[in-house]
Amino acid sequence: MADSVTSLFRSTAAHSPSMAALTRESDGAGPVDFCIPCNPYFPTPAMFEDMAGRLRDIITYYPSSADTITAELCSLLQLPPQCVAMGNGSTELITWIDHLLVRESLAVPVPTFGRWTDQPMETGKRVDMFPLQEAGGFALDPAQYAEFIRARGTRVAVICNPNNPDGGFLHKHAVVQFMDAMADLDLVVIDESFLEFADAENEPSVVQEAMLRPNVIVLRSLGKNFGLHGIRFGYLVANPALAGKVRSMLPKWNLNSFAEHVVFMLKEHGAEYAQSLHQVRRDRMDMSGQLSSLPGLTVYPSQGNFLFVRLPVGAEGTVVRDRMLTEHRILVRECGNKIGSSSRFLRLVVRPQVDVRRLVSGLEQVLYGTSRRGAAVPEQATGTGYSSGTAAVDRLVSRTNGAGTRGLAAQAAGAGAPGLAAAPSTGTGMPLPAAASAPAVGAGGGMPVPAAASVVTGAGAGMPGVPQPVAQPVPQPVPQFVPQPAPQEVPQPVPQPLSQPVPPQVPEPLPQPAQPLAPVAQAAQAAQAPMPAAAAYPAQTPPAGLTPPGVPARGGLTAAQVRGTDGLSAAPATGWPGPQSWPNAAGMGQVG
């Protein structure tokens, strides 16, 4: 595997080769997987034995219709079937949301799950990317995000809660306020794919609120929660009109027989499922503490079943990734191909303690030179610190925020491009293009609404043959986003340990030692630029209609344009119900 590991990562269209590909390459069992975020404690061994005993029937016969499987899931979650659409994985649902409900622009904080940026670009939509700042721990400020959406004139907004890859979390009251402030948008999507791993509050899901609003969809995953990525199934919750629109486009047999079998097993295994989530939360705290003890390694707070970590200064993610796989048979997720991230960051899935000890031991050897090959060092002569072909797309979007490619050849030659900000250094976040402040027009207090811009931004700005939009006033009034204090929660009893003691809190990362280990490169971390004010972003002219197929939305970029431009390389607080019932309608619950 050592000779071909790099080619395996370069040849895949995904961020990492599949476990099947790695197993074939190694002629045996695959590596310990810290890359793919799924539940390691569910299904139980008894459930796997049951599936194995029925394998012949499962794979021989057609599954029931999606309506039948959806009705069974809804009976467990206590949700009305008309408000639910099940898909062959959440990615299928994201694809249909984009095709059916995203007209011409979508906003999303970055870094985040890649399909929320890539899917709309592939269909010619403009993607407005709101940079989460490393200096702020990648925390999302919903008020600033709302101002950004208003300034850009975006029509669809996405929030992943918790966010992937950093595990950032917003409390329920903040998400509901954001949804209400964005009530005039075409669509608001709250991606709750990892929410069942959160323990910051008892019932953080907003599915009940989504069903009452005309423009909100909540997306949820089943494969991640149930530890079954190979069975592609997920679901969305929305008001009947929205859910029905998506459901009507899905194939009648888009769900496979394995998905059906698992869904019909769940009513007998609610207690085991709840226990698995509880154990993942305990493991997350323990794993965070162990990783934080490594000198120079920064571990960010997470409410997902993964941890986002920044490597010590001088360590390059692809080197660490490749050596962890070839020398220690451990697969990690290097994040250089995530827009808004760089290869100094890894996403590490929460696993049992025995695997975490192996991970920490491997990182110590690779990072600090206690193995025969010495310490990990930066790749030489790349000039970027980024690791993959899509990093070039990251750099382009960093400079233009999806607004255009003019002058890119000059940038590649080192001359810079007129009107574009300088390329960011690794780990400094993703600055957006500077622009003159637009006069604010508001209806009373709260968030000001910028007037329509009188200048053209984007790929079409100043280019011959590209029609220039005419500034129009923004219709009044629009909802104002005024954050309200969170409601007081009754403190919950702290669960008693099941086996190992649990640290009271996630330790703070250790400071860099005065005499660092010799192999770790000495370098100063790049200063973090503050978040630009909302008025610094040009306001956009409201769309006159739908964007024609294949035409970039309002000066945006299609995926082909981006990748083809010169210079770019390739349950309730008292516990979960018994076996005859399932969690509340939010699909959530806590174990006391």
Image (tube, rainbow, N blue to C red):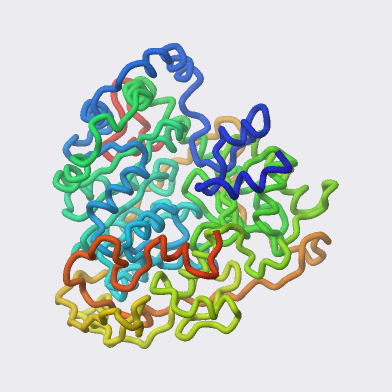
- The percent position of residue 88, horizontal first and vertical second, equals 34, 36
In the image shown, does 125 or 318 lie closer to the viewer?
A: 125
Q: Residue at (17%, 42%) from the top-left corner? A: 244
Q: Residue at (65%, 53%) from the top-left corner? A: 292
- The percent position of residue 509, horizontal first and vertical second, equals 64, 58
Q: Looking at the image, is 572 positioned above or below residue 258?
A: below
- The percent position of residue 476, horizontal first and vertical second, equals 14, 76
Q: Is residue 267 in sight in this rendering?
A: no
Q: Residue at (46%, 30%) from the top-left corner? A: 275
Q: Residue at (75%, 55%) from the top-left corner? A: 376
Specify whether 551 is left or right of 130.
left
Q: Residue furthest right?
A: 372
The number of callouts visible is 0
Specify whether 568 is left or right of 315.
left
**Residue 386 quadrant:** bottom right
In the image shown, does 583 or 344 lie closer to the viewer?
A: 344
In the image shown, does 178 or 501 lie closer to the viewer?
A: 178
- The percent position of residue 416, horizontal first and vertical second, equals 55, 82
Q: Looking at the image, is 484 positioned above or below residue 421?
A: above
Q: Residue furthest front?
A: 465
Q: Quadrant of the N terminus?
A: top right
**Residue 587 quadrant:** top left
Q: Is residue 9 in sight in this rendering?
A: yes
Q: Looking at the image, is 85 positioned above or below residue 544?
A: above
Q: Quadrant of the C terminus?
A: top left
